[in-house]
Amino acid sequence: MTQSEQPQLPPIDEQQGKHAPLIEHLIELRGRLLRSVLVVICLFIGMYPFANDLYMIVSEPLRELLPEGTQMIATEVASPFLAPFKLTLVLAIFGAIPYILYQAWSFIAPGLYQHEKKIAMPLLASSIFLFYAGAVFAYYVVFPLIFAFFTSAGPGDVAVMTDINSYLNFVLKLFFAFGVAFEIPVATFILIWTGITTVESLSEKRPYVVIFCFVIGMLLTPPDVISQTLLAVPMWILYELGILMGRLVKRSQEKAKAENEEQE
């Protein structure tokens, strides 16, 4: 068989070889997103029969402080249905956060180094715990204080009768604000661990951080001093906790570096 008669192999599509891994990653990401959405839907279906009871639990900090003879009201036709529905959906998402973050971790873990995996799992668990801790702090500490202030600060002839939908929007905003604020130690630790900043630099910027915390408290909370302070002070304390964690990590890294130099 001559050279001209030899069978010709099909040309290799270099673009297809380049895009195959990307397509596989997108397919995997789609599957993990679908599983996360499915978990949220299952939690929502399981909790929806108790939607009204869940709303009563969330609204208890205000209902306990309402003046005698007053109650919460619905000013819109669909509010008695939409408010518990919205609350149940949000609680389903909150409840699925550990699974959603696990799916995110499973997606990015293969691309991490071994030492990064060791530190990423504690950070993931800490972020979940701190977010829930922020929501619990808002419910048991912040709500009773600010609602006691709101219900007693109004004119004597004005009946306090809060709309159920407005109340839900208010408390969900505070839940989210405190949940995110409690993530400050994790964010501070990551900044120090990745080398973006140093413990010394963060310590020097402490006065500016305190002012920033009160500005964030002013923007994320209602226009009263109590709720602003209740958000700003924990943010400042958590910032200090993040710096402390960064110092401990820095010392452990320096110790491990010194031991490696001694072995060499």
Image: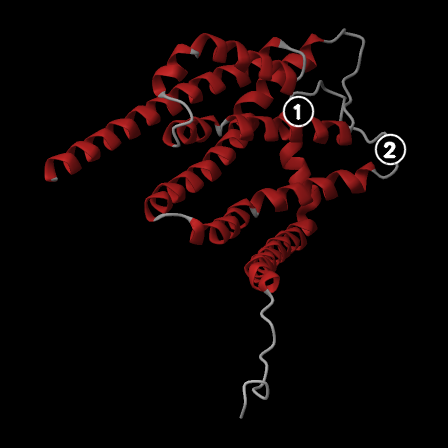
Which amino acid does the dot numbered 2 rest on? Answer: Glu
Q: How many marks?
A: 2
Quadrant in the picture for residue 176: top right
Q: Is residue 184 left or right of residue 122?
A: right
Vertical side of 199 occupied by 6: above or below? below
Q: Residues within 10 Å of mark 1 (few under 14, many from 20)?
A: some
**Circle 2 residue:** 76
Indicate the secondary structure of the residue bearing disc 2. Answer: loop
The disc at residue 62 is 1
Q: Residues within 10 Å of mark 2 (few under 14, many from 20)?
A: few
23 and 219: which is toward the camera? 23
220 and 155: which is toward the camera? 220
* Front position among marks 2 and 1: 2
Which amino acid does the dot numbered 1 rest on? Answer: Leu
**Percent x, y of residue 13:** 60, 67
**Percent x, y of residue 220:** 63, 20
Q: Residue at x 41, y 48 (%)?
A: 112
The disc at residue 247 is none
223 and 206: which is toward the camera? 206
Q: Is residue 167 left or right of residue 36?
A: right
Q: Residue at x 79, y 41 (%)?
A: 82
Vertical side of 128 occupied by 176: above or below? above
Marks 2/1: CA–CA distance: 20 Å
Residue 190 visible in the current orientation: yes
